[in-house]
Amino acid sequence: MVIEFVATCLFGLEHFLGEEIDRLGYRRTETIDGRVSFIGDEAAIARCNIHLRCAERVYIKMGSFRARTFGELFEGTKAIEWERFIGREDAFPVKGHAVKSKLFSIPDCQSIVKKAIVKRLMHGHKVGTLPEDGALYKVRFALRKDTVEIYLDTSGDGLHK
């Protein structure tokens, strides 16, 4: 399975992080301030979390879409195949931030993203409830200029710890 990843780092370390990703054999797709995007497989999750010395965190990029309304945010989030990564009993807290977007209320956005994931997981796993007492999967979103990027955190605690 081909997965798009984003490794975050301190500003100025992108070049070194990119070289580490190259040495692990993964293909970089984008380098911008504070992060490097790359393509990998399922094994990249563990390999990158163990071997990337310059990274703060390694995320799976679950999706990216435009959202100017809460309806668009809900539908875009619901369209993502969450059931591929999150089980029927797993916990998935949602956090995020917004910069220069029409959707700027973080608590409202968190609530909408959570509801959309719940709806998708209930349908995908064919269950009526999600107890959220299993493994922890942290969901993160970033709203920048009305574009949403949604990630799944694979690192747990920051890699510097």
Image (tube, grey):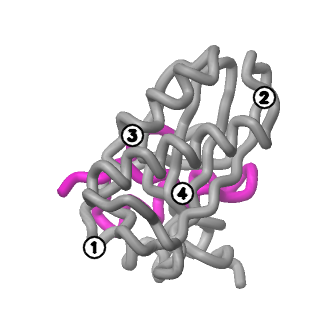
- Tag shown at residue 7: 4
Q: Amino acid at mark 4?
A: Ala
Q: Earlier in the sequence, mark 3 or mark 2?
A: 3
Looking at marks 3 and 1 on the same chain, the residue that comes earlier in the sequence is marked by 3
Crowding at dot 2, Cα within 10 Å, few <14 / some 14-19 / many 20+, comes out as few
Observer-nearest of 62 and 28: 62
Please identify, in this view, whether the residue under mark 2 or under mark 4 is nearer the observer: 2
Tell me the amino acid under the disc marked 2: Val
Q: Which residue is mark 3?
A: 29
* Residue 118 spot, x, y in % from top left: 47, 51
Q: CA distance from mark 1 to mark 4?
A: 15 Å
Kindly indicate whether the residue at mark 1 contacts the one at mark 2 (C-beta within 8 angstroms). no
- Name the N-terminal-most of marks 2 and 1: 1
* Residue under numbered circle 2: 99
Q: Magenta stretch?
A: 1-30
Query: Hey, which residue is sitting farthest left in the picture?
Result: 1
